[in-house]
Image (cartoon, rainbow, N blue to C red):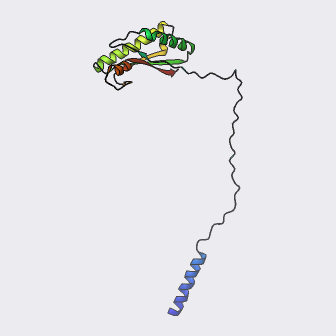
């Protein structure tokens, strides 16, 4: 019986090895060609080109414990008003800042008075009030981290932040 069993096991093993999992024959599929998307740029003539609006405002500075517009800022604000009247789609956020001296509450109020003073000055020059938002950061966002008069003078300011409508 052992004589018959060994050849039978060898035959069964060889049958399994050679019959195993047949390879799946792959039939060549058509290659999928993705069309490249080409977009033709429209031809623009010089008169069709729109000028890019780039408005650069300088910072308005203030004296110690003051929210009065200084003479040095008058020409800056006059130019800013002229630009804002020329571009009615542009709105501006006026951010008031203070130096580190004084309490947080006092500086927030002073920063607001500074931004309102700049807003009112621009309104008097013909800019729509609805295009001018005011906010105060008090002493929370200093331009200069120093602890001397030069640094403090840089921190007493109103900055213009351009926003589109």
Say above or below: 39 vs 19.
Answer: above
Say above or below: 71 vs 32.
Answer: above
Question: What residue is rendered at 66% in x and 63% in y?
Answer: 26
Q: Position of residue 25 (x, y in %)?
A: 66, 66
Q: Where is residue 15 in the image (x, y as percent from the top left)?
A: 59, 80
Q: Quadrant of residue 65?
A: top left
Question: What residue is rendered at 35% in x and 20% in y?
Answer: 150
Say above or below: 36 vs 14.
Answer: above
Q: Give the left or right position of residue 66, taking residue 161 as reference.
A: left
Q: Where is residue 98 in the image (x, y as percent from the top left)?
A: 35, 19
> Which residue is nearer to you in this view: 81 or 75?
75
Q: In which quarter of the image is residue 146?
A: top left
Q: Given the current orientation, which residue lies at the most extreme top position?
A: 124
Q: Give the left or right position of residue 123, taking residue 40 as reference.
A: left
Question: What residue is rendered at 49% in x and 10% in y?
Answer: 75
> Which residue is nearer to you in this view: 94 or 20?
94
Question: What residue is rendered at 50% in x and 22% in y?
Answer: 163
Number of marks = 0
Can you see residue 1?
no
Q: Give the left or right position of residue 51, taking residue 45 as reference.
A: left
Q: Position of residue 48 (x, y in %)?
A: 69, 22
Can you see residue 44?
yes
Q: Give the left or right position of residue 112, taking residue 48 as reference.
A: left
């Amino acid at each position: 019986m052992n004589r018959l069993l060994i050849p039978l096991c060898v035959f069964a093993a060889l049958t399994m090895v050679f019959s195993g999992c047949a390879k799946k024959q792959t039939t060549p599929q058509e290659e999928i060609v993705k069309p490249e998307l080409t977009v033709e740029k429209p031809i623009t003539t010089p008169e069709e080109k729109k000028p890019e609006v780039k408005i650069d405002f300088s910072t308005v500075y203030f004296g110690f414990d003051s929210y009065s517009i200084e003479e040095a800022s008058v020409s800056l604000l006059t130019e800013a008003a002229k630009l804002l009247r020329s571009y009615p789609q542009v709105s501006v956020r006026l951010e008031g800042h203070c130096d580190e001296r004084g309490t947080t509450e006092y500086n927030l109020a002073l920063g607001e008075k500074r931004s309102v003073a700049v807003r009112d000055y621009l309104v008097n020059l013909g800019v729509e009030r609805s295009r001018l938002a005011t906010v105060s950061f008090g002493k929370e966002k200093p331009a200069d981290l120093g602890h001397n008069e030069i640094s403090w003078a840089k921190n007493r300011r109103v900055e213009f932040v351009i926003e589109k409508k």
